[in-house]
Amino acid sequence: MGNSTGNPDYRDSGLEFSADFVFGSATASYQIEGAVDEDGRGPSIWDTFSHTPGLVWNGDTGDVADDHYHRLDDDLDLMKSLGLEAYRFSIAWPRIQPNGRGPANEKGMAFYERLVDGLIARGIRPIATLYHWDLPQALEDEGGWTSRATAYAFADYARIVGERLGDRVETWTTLNEPWCSAYLGYGSGAHAPGRTDGAAALTAVHHLNLAHGLAILALRDVVRNDPDFSITLNLHVLRGEGETGPEAVRQIDGIANRVFLGPLLKGEYPADVFDDTASVTDWSFVEPGDLEIIHQPLDVLGVNYYSTTLVRVWDGVSERQSSDGHKDVGGSAWPGADRIEFLQQPGPYTAMGWNIEPSGLEELLVSLHEQFPGQPLMVTENGAAFDDVVVLDENGPAVHDDDRIDFLRRHFTAAHRAMARGVDLRGYQVWSLMDNFEWGYGYSKRFGIVRVDYDTLERLPKDSAHWYSELVKTHRIPD
């Protein structure tokens, strides 16, 4: 495998993708649907969290969001007009089982049947994520992901959905970014349910891994087509600084990446992670047989990538830096890693304060290919928040988001280079189709290629949407 060729800044043009490469866009249920108390939907941990004063910027909630629940057909038409080949959406567990258990709520199920049927009717491939963080609040009240029972409840939910949609969905993704669910939800407190307990976070890691394996077994049992089974991870691309860099990278790679990749793809937890976190937990929640359940063959591994992470071992004297790219609300997303510091990186940055580094995507994809040579991959999220401005042109309102186009161009180039180096990359889902509720940041960060006016809920495709539409149509990065 040689080094990359092309512009060092990743601004290549004219690169072509094969006809079977799948271009699409991604969203998540709580971020876009709204209608949180309609048609039998129960409360999720994000309803509770966003309604708790002080936890989300501006007191924003997902109560209305983009009102996608009521605008489904128009949004499907919008996807078709952009030429999307795939749409990665998530199913809200509390719409299917309001309390996290029991039979399907028919009205909730009907919404997703309409969604999937509407995609198929428009020639768009459905990629369904079963869990994008909206755990039914009733299950959190029983311990949430710190409770082993939640993993089994998730398998029952997967079975119910699989029974109903298992003749139509082309790709099933069990979990989106379990790193966030475990460490931001139970460790740092930045995400719902807002707990700050390192032992709880590591317990959640294992129960999420277990839930994934159980869900794939349940789906395999009931689906009637021949879908791809998948999980999506936000793997951290780590860079070390100075002589302690390699040790810092080893430790953070353990709790950020290998604690998922090990069980999922090798059937084992890394021994050094157990050593590093021994002061936090004894891992006795890992029971005999669990690793066999977790280690299911994956047809595709979903990869979410936004930026890189720079680490070193803290000297214990100077003020410890914690620029890990996540909202700091007091807890730690890094149990057992108190001696590691996260350094501010050189810009430019997105509106999230994340560094823009397309080489990180190429590096990540190639690294996964080298570690797991036969494993097909898909970029399931990549995109950027910028402070978009609406201007009035001769054709009416427009958003000239050149910085987002530049971001996407460079990252598609990175993906193309990884494929030229032998990586089996099957597709790319841009985050996000529409501006939406950006978790703890509320509506203050816009990731969409389509602008949403939160007063009128009107959709306006940005220049990036037109650029992407051209890429999808031609399978060639526009000049």
Image: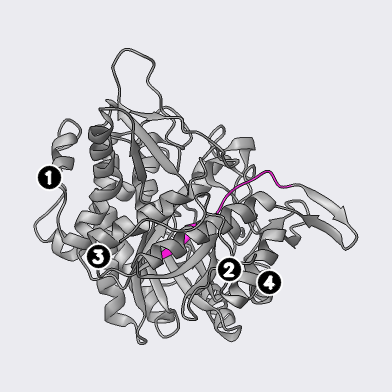
Q: Secondary structure at mark 4?
A: helix
The residue wearing badge 1 is 271
At label 2, counting other C-alpha atoms closer than 10 Å, the crowd grade (few under 14, some 14-19, many 20 or more) is few
Classify mark 3: helix, strand or loop. helix
Left or right of 263 in this view: 64? right
Quarter holding residue 423: bottom left
- Nearer to me, 37 or 177: 177
Q: Earlier in the sequence, mark 2 or mark 3?
A: 2
Please tell me whether mark 1 sits on a helix, a strand or a loop.
helix
Q: Which comes before the other along the chain, label 2 or label 4? A: 2
Is residue 328 located in the magenta-colored stretch of the structure?
A: no
Q: Which residue is mark 4?
A: 78
Image mark for residue 122: none
Tell me the amino acid under the disc marked 2. Gly
Question: Are there few (<14), some (14-19), or many (20+) residues within 10 Å of tag 1?
Answer: few
Q: Is residue 251 above or below residue 145?
A: above
Which residue is labeled 3 in the image?
Answer: 213
Residue in view at x 34 percent, y 82 percent: 223
Kindly identify the residue that appears in the image at 50 percent across and 68 percent down.
88
Q: Earlier in the sequence, mark 1 or mark 2?
A: 2
Categorize mark 4 by other alpha carbons within 10 Å: few (<14), some (14-19), many (20+). Answer: some
Which of 367/351 is in front? Answer: 367
What amino acid is labelled 3 in the image? Gly
* Residue 462 visible within the image: no
Marks 1 and 4 sit apart, C-alpha to C-alpha, by 48 Å
**Residue type at numbered disc 4:** Leu
Query: Is residue 117 shown left or right of residue 269?
Result: right
Res 14 label = 2
User: Relative to residue 259, is residue 440 drawn left or right?
Assistant: right
| C-alpha distance separating marks 2 and 3 | 41 Å
Disc 1 to disc 2, C-alpha distance: 45 Å
